[in-house]
Amino acid sequence: MFDLAFIWAGIIAFAVLVYVVLDGFDLGIGILFPFGKSEKDQDVMMNSIAPVWDGNETWLVLGGGGLFAVFPLAYAVVMPALYVPIILMLIALIFRGVAFEYRWRTKRWKKVWDAAFFGGSLIATFMQGIALGALVQGIEIENRAYAGGWWDWLTPFSILTGFALIAGYALLGATFLILKTEHELQAQMRNYAWKLGIATLGFIGVVSLLTPLQDSVYFERWFNFPGSLYTIFVPALVALAAFMLFSGLKAKKDATPFLSSLALFVLSFVGLGISFYPHMVPPSLTIWQAAAPESSLWFTLVGTIVLIPLILGYTAYAYWVFRGKTDPDAGYH
């Protein structure tokens, strides 16, 4: 009655998407952090995400832990293939988290922790983009194990997706600061959002053109009927989201640019899902081949049905409590 592997693939995809859109903007603020014109502006930038940044990373744990629990073969293949970018990402996230706490407790080393906050955000984002690019271009599998080389993850395409994610996360960060700040800092971020929006759309276009060339399966799915319908439908929605982004920036609206930026990420994720399905690890490992036994899927699903609403609930509550503009005179919370 239930395709448990398919349901779990949807849950993992949902967790990854929520992580990208939530942690994306606070990593983006870290990328933009050195461009704050004063220490006070930098404090406001950091305070705007202080109540939520660590909670956002819950979804990374859920996505990674879920993959290990319910798609162990996919985990066993992906980890050896992407050890270097994943380890570098985790180290960068650790430095970023430590810097977030320590910069408020020192004067002598404040610049060091500022650099760690920026560097951790930048490297974590770049490594996430490289890992995504390496996954899109395909992972070589033989006898249910990774059969590629140590540096297969490092290619021109994966480097391109790394820079694309930096631009995209920075756009999310800039538009979030438009939502949360006022006066000069808001005007500065609105100016950045114009440039970052153009850069992000350019990267989306280039990556979208190159993705079907990475594997014949992608090409057939996007350019043969009925997949060709997606080729029209998804870009049309991307164009609409882009129009809303720039019209919102022109009209100096607070929320519209951020929501439009989120829409660009969601639509890009949908396009990626269309390219991947039904593979868990392209180009040869499907969702059903990678899934754990049905008894394990049922057991973990019961707990997840309870856990996800709880996480969504406290996440929504945190954002509701700390809604509104960030007070530039408030201390660290």
Image: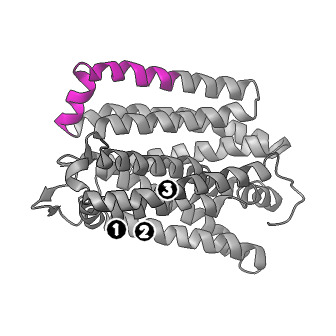
Q: Amino acid at mark 1?
A: Val
* Magenta segment includes 233: yes
Task: Kindly identify the residue that appears in the image at 30 percent across and 51 percent down.
Answer: 135
Q: Viewed as shown, does residue 216 lie left or right of 169? A: left
Say which label, 3 or 1, has the lower sequence index.
1
Task: Kindly identify the residue that appears in the image at 80 percent across and 46 percent down.
Answer: 181
Residue that label 3 marks = 125
Instruction: Report the span colored magenta.
Output: 215-239
Return the residue found at the far front.
1
Q: Quadrant of the C terminus?
A: bottom right
* Magenta segment includes 227: yes
Along the line of sight, the residue nearer the viewer: 283 or 310: 310
Q: Are marks 2 and 1 in contact (CB under 8 Å)?
A: yes
Q: Position of residue 18 (x, y in %)?
A: 53, 48
Q: Is residue 301 above or below residue 101?
A: above
Q: Quadrant of residue 208?
A: top left
Main SS, magenta region, reads helix
What colouring style does the render use? one colour
Residue that label 1 marks = 84
Q: Amino acid at mark 2?
A: Leu
Residue that label 2 marks = 88
Q: Is residue 19 above or below residue 221?
A: below
**How many numbered circles are shown?**
3
Q: Are marks 2 and 3 in contact (CB under 8 Å)?
A: no
Q: Amino acid at mark 3?
A: Thr
How would you rate the neighbour count of disc 1 (Cα within 10 Å): few for under 14, some for 14-19, many for 20 or more?
A: some
Helix, strand or loop at mark 2? helix
From where the camera sits, is residue 67 visible?
no
